[in-house]
């Protein structure tokens, strides 16, 4: 078993390697002057079971190309098996034709990863479960529920807690965490206009005097999350916090979160934090390194990954 890290999220890769008690593969991954990606691996890869850690996060196109070129380098170095570990699967929100003459970019990315030479994919909290079907190779889609449930139990008051899904699409995710915490569930009924913009129409469930925890997979512009928090407070919620797996937080999202009705936002380290996120006092990070590291160990040992979530 070997672990190779791309440049998208080096701190997470180092944390995973520390959890597994093994060094990262010695490799050079750099850019030429025209920004072409160059990869050179300085260890023998022949016959090895290699895990390549690379998120498709900002800058998404650069990190995707780096992922593909690393896979190609490993394949040409005769690695026995290449597992693409993609903590954040970029382009995952483009999982269907949202309108006429639009692409299904998640399927295109799946094709590129497969053709490049990956033998399997390990990822976290896909935006839509059907993306697994876009691949013709095995896909292990991990869930952040065990990490969040542990964090909520250790750091949040359980009295009058209510788990909230910010939209109908996240009900299954929120219900799973509510069941594990033996908490009630509410749903935000929203209408989405242009990308990144949404309007809250109704709150399904009685949130009056409840401590609301909003659960979702991605926070990007933070508009949906902050609108949901404001609507919950207007409906009588005592407080609102958020637990979101992938903290994209592009543009002025960190500042928007800091000035919103959210008391606190918890994200994972699936995406390397920007400076704005790092200095935001209302945003905290929990690590997914043990979860991903344990899944990698089980894949290498040919043991069950799904039992992590029993």
Image (tube, rainbow, N blue to C red):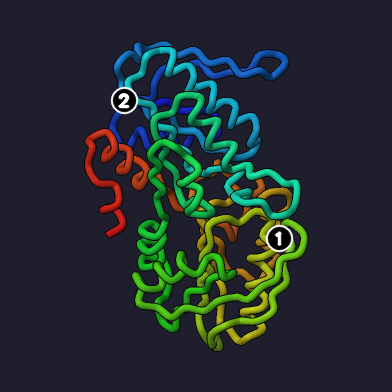
Q: Earlier in the sequence, mark 1 or mark 2?
A: 2
In front: label 1 or label 2: 2
Residue that badge 2 annotates:
49
- The x and y percentages for residue 52 are 43, 29
Q: Which mark is residue 23?
A: none
- The x and y percentages for residue 205 are 54, 85
Where is 284 relative to 292, above or below? Answer: below
- The x and y percentages for residue 111 are 54, 33
Q: Quadrant of the C terminus?
A: bottom left
Residue that badge 1 annotates:
256
Q: Residue 195 versus residue 102: which sits nearer the camera?
A: 102
| Residue 53 occupies quadrant | top left
- The x and y percentages for residue 51 are 38, 30
Where is 171 relative to 51, above or below? Answer: below
Label 1 sits on a secondary structure element that is helix
Q: Quadrant of the N terminus?
A: top left
Q: Is residue 242 left or right of residue 2?
A: right
Is residue 285 something one can see in this rendering? Answer: no
Q: Is residue 198 left or right of residue 284?
A: right
Residue at x 73%, y 54% (from the top left corner): 99
Residue at x 29%, y 47% (from the top left corner): 305
Label 2 sits on a secondary structure element that is strand
Where is 209 relative to 20, above or below? Answer: below
Residue at x 57%, y 83% (from the top left corner): 204
Residue at x 72%, y 46% (from the top left corner): 102
| Residue 179 occupies quadrant | bottom left
Q: Is residue 136 left or right of residue 307?
A: right
Is residue 257 something one can see in this rendering? Answer: yes
Report the Cα–Cα distance between label 1 and label 2: 43 Å
């Amino acid at each position: 078993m070997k672990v190779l890290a791309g440049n998208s999220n080096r701190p997470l890769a180092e944390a995973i390697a520390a959890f597994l008690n093994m060094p990262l593969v010695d490799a050079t991954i750099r850019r030429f002057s025209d920004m072409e990606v160059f990869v050179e691996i300085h260890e023998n890869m022949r016959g090895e079971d290699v895990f390549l850690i690379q998120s498709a996060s900002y800058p998404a196109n650069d990190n995707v190309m780096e992922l593909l070129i690393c896979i190609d380098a490993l394949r040409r170095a005769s690695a026995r098996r290449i597992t693409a570990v993609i903590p954040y699967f970029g382009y995952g929100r483009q999982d269907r034709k949202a309108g006429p003459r639009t692409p299904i970019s998640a399927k295109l990315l799946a094709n590129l990863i497969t053709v490049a030479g990956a033998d399997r994919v390990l990822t976290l909290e896909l935006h839509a479960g059907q993306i697994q079907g876009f691949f013709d190779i095995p896909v292990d889609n991990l869930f952040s529920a065990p990490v969040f449930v542990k964090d909520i139990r250790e750091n949040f008051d359980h009295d009058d807690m209510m788990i909230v899904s910010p939209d109908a699409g996240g009900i299954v995710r929120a219900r799973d965490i509510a069941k594990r915490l033996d908490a009630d569930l509410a749903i935000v009924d929203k209408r989405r206009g242009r990308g990144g913009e949404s309007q809250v129409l109704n709150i399904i469930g009685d949130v009056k005097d409840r401590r609301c925890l909003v659960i979702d997979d991605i926070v990007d512009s933070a508009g949906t999350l902050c609108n949901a928090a404001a609507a919950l407070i207007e409906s009588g919620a005592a407080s609102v916090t958020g637990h979101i797996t992938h903290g994209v937080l592009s543009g002025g999202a960190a500042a928007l979160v800091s000035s919103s009705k959210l008391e606190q936002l918890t994200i994972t380290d699936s995406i390397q934090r920007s400076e704005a996120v790092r200095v935001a006092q209302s945003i905290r990070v929990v690590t997914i390194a043990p979860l991903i590291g344990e899944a990698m160990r089980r894949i290498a040992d040919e043991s069950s990954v799904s039992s992590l979530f029993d």
